[in-house]
Every structure is written in C-alpha cells, then in structure tokens.
Image: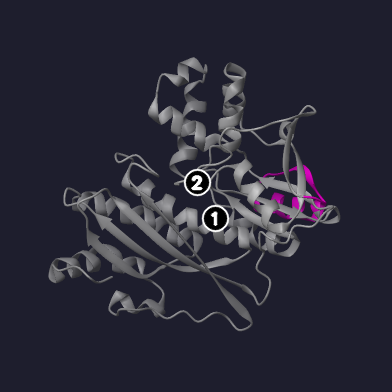
C-alpha cells in the first residue's frame, strides 16, 4: 500500500493496522509494491473486484467493522458463484481526513475476522486521503481446477433453476434503515426487524457451497443487483429462456411478514438487490446431489424454475406473468 505524500504517516498506519492482515508469504509483509500468488498445480486463478462508496452502497454512519466485512464478502460471493476457493485480496481505501484511528481500528478488526474465517488474507493495496466520501475497493483471488470455472453463459434448456438462502431481506433492511417507522407499519417484531437490518449490514456469502456449485452447476452467478435482473442477465448471455415460479422463491419469515402487510413490496423483494445469494442452473438429475451437499454445508437451497429453449426469463405468480418497473439496481 503506497502512494501517499505523507509517507511516514502512511507507513505507520500500514504497519499498525494493515500489515497484521497480510499473513500470506507472497504479501512480503506489505513491504513491496506488489505481491506474488502461485496457484496450486493444475489450477486456474479466478479474479473478481467490487467496491463500495459511502452514501451509495452503505450509510456513512454504518459501523466500520461491518463496512469492511461487507465489501470483502461481496467479492467472496462472486468467487463462490464461480466455484472458486479464496486465496487472498488486494484493497484500496480512500479515507476523508475526519476518519480517526479508532474508526480504522474497527474497520481492520472486521477484516481480520473475515480474512481468517474465509482463508482470504490481505496481499496488498493502496491507502489515500480523499475530499469525498469513504470508498473501499477490493480485488479478490481464488483458485479452482483448470477449466472448471462455472460461467453465467452456459445454462442449458432443460436445466433446473436453484437459488440459495432467502431473497429480498437486504433490500427490505435498507428500507428500514432509511425509515424506522416501517417496522411498525409492517408489524414486524423486534427480532424480525433486526434480521432484515442484519442482512443489509452483513451479507452471508455461500463459499461453503462453492465446491458443490463447481461440481454440479451448468451456470451460476451471485445475486447482487436484484434477483430478477441478475437471473435475466444469466438467461440473456446463455441464450436461453426460463420460467420462474415466484411463489417458490425462498423468503424469510421477516420478508413474508412484510408482504402480508404490504403485498406491493414483492417487487422490492425480487429486484432490490444486496442478497449475495447464488442462483444456478443444473441438470434435474443433479438436484438431489446438490441438496445433499448444501445440507452438509448448512446452506438452504430451493428449486424455483426451469430453463427452456428461447430467449428471456419469465417470472410467474399463480399463472400471471409479472412485469417490473426496475428489474435490478443500476448505477447508470
């Protein structure tokens, strides 16, 4: 991590806070301008990157330990959907002058917990001051056997469509974060309110299922910008059609409670984003094996539809095809 004009202050910051995260020998204790990663024999290196900006991807007063863990987990989710095992990450951080060392300490503590849990150490990066909002960008690296990365463009007609976890919780959590009175309007008890807020703050990437995705999926992608929009992308690049039974899309008790109070929020649930679940397609004969692997990994999976010949995804609720004003989140 280099590039600051205040070299001595930056070196002190790196040595105190970031160097302890650089446990990989190839990181050289963050003493060099680059790191070295050697994939295991017969393996490909999988690369992904994602970032967050205060006021766009998170609220500026969110706890710093959640901000750091969220941006790392966003990248880990991408690796999981490709069937890859994480091996490390690079990080660039731009911090306003108002950010103090207590904030940085909490930010790094969150990163350290997740880096250890997921086996994904810091390899290097960059630290800067910015006159604008906080921004954090991570590039994560993973490995898998040569030629076995699961792409989003390889779904096949006849495949089943399966999704992990539950959909829509984080988008509802963002709404609650903006308007606390919604909890009363939706008649949410405190426990369910906390569940939705936590799903926004801290994604649960499905890395425990990565190997099963690699072994069984014909195509997959993580759901970050909204289920409807992301699965539609998968169908589009695969050149296939699909029909999704919306009533089978897995929902948490909290999301179901919201929909009882306000049925129109179904669109928010299906298109809001920040789920960081995996949607995958696979042959019907492989669904049971995936379910077994998912059960062993402690990850819920639900079959929700079927891939067909043609073009485009259809989302059907009791025989009625749904349309959406905004299928997914977009910056542009």
Residues at marks 1 and 2, CA–CA distance in whole angstroms: 9 Å
35, above or below 181, in the image? below
Q: Label 1 neighbourhood size at 10 Å, few (<14), some (14-19), many (20+)?
A: many
Q: Residue at x 37, y 48 (%)?
A: 67
Tell me which residue sits at (27%, 78%) in the image: 31
Q: What is the quadrant of the N terminus in the image?
A: bottom left
Q: Is residue 144 above or below residue 169?
A: below
Question: Of residues 307 and 45, which is closer to you in this image?
Answer: 307
Q: Is residue 202 magenta?
A: no
Q: Is residue 257 above or below residue 325?
A: above
Q: Position of residue 94 (x, y in %)?
A: 27, 57
Q: Which residues are magenta?
A: 287-310
Residue 32's disc number: none
Q: Would you say residue 298 is visible in this rendering?
A: no
Judged from the image, the secondary structure of the residue bearing numbered disc 1 is: helix
Give the image location of residue 185, x and y in percent: 48, 15
Residue 18 position within the rendered picture, expressed as x and y whole percent measured from the top left? 29, 65
Task: Determine the residue positioned at 31% across, 76% down.
Answer: 29
Give percent across and percent down for residue 304.
Answer: 75, 41
Q: Give left or right: position of 128 versus 243.
A: left
The quarter of the picture where residue 212 lies is: bottom right
Q: Are circles 1 and 2 on residues that touch, CB within 8 Å? A: yes
Residue 267, by quadrant, is: top right
Residue that numbered label 2 is attached to: 203
Which one is in front, 215 or 47?
47
* Horizontal arrangement in the rendering, residue 18 relative to residue 293 (left or right): left
Magenta includes 291? yes
Q: Residue at x 57, y 80 (%)?
A: 40
> What number is the disc on residue 77?
1
Q: In front here: 301 or 220?
A: 220
Residue 276 in view (yes/no): yes
């Amino acid at each position: 991590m280099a590039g600051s004009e205040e070299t001595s202050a930056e070196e002190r910051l790196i040595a105190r806070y970031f160097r302890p995260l650089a446990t990989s020998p190839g990181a050289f204790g963050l003493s060099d301008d680059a790191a070295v990663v050697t994939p295991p024999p017969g393996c490909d290196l999988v690369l992904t990157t994602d970032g967050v900006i205060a006021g766009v991807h998170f609220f500026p007063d969110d706890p710093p330990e959640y901000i750091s863990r969220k941006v790392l987990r966003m990248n880990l989710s991408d690796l999981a959907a490709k069937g890859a095992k994480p091996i490390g990450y690079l990080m660039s951080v731009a911090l306003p002058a108002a950010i103090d060392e207590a904030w940085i300490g909490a930010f790094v503590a969150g990163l350290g917990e997740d880096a250890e849990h997921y086996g994904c150490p810091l390899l290097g990066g960059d630290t800067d001051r910015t006159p604008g909002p906080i921004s954090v960008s991570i590039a994560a690296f993973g490995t898998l056997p040569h030629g076995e990365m699961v792409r989003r463009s390889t779904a096949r007609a006849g495949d089943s469509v399966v999704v992990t976890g539950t959909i829509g919780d984080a988008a509802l959590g963002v709404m609650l974060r903006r308007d606390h009175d919604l909890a009363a309007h939706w008649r949410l008890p405190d426990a369910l309110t906390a569940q939705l807020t936590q799903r926004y703050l801290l994604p649960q990437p499905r890395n425990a299922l990565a190997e099963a995705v690699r072994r069984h999926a014909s195509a997959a992608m993580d759901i970050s910008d909204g289920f409807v929009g992301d699965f539609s992308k998968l169908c589009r690049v695969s050149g296939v059609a699909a029909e999704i039974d919306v009533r089978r899309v897995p929902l948490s008790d909290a999301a179901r409670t919201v929909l009882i109070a306000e049925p129109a929020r179904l669109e928010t649930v299906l298109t809001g984003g920040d789920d960081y679940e995996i949607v995958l397609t696979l042959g019907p004969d492989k669904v049971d094996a995936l379910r077994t692997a998912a059960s062993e990994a402690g990850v819920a999976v639900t079959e929700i539809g079927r891939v067909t010949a043609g073009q485009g995804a259809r989302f059907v609720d009791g025989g009625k095809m749904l349309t959406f004003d905004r299928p997914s989140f977009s910056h542009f």
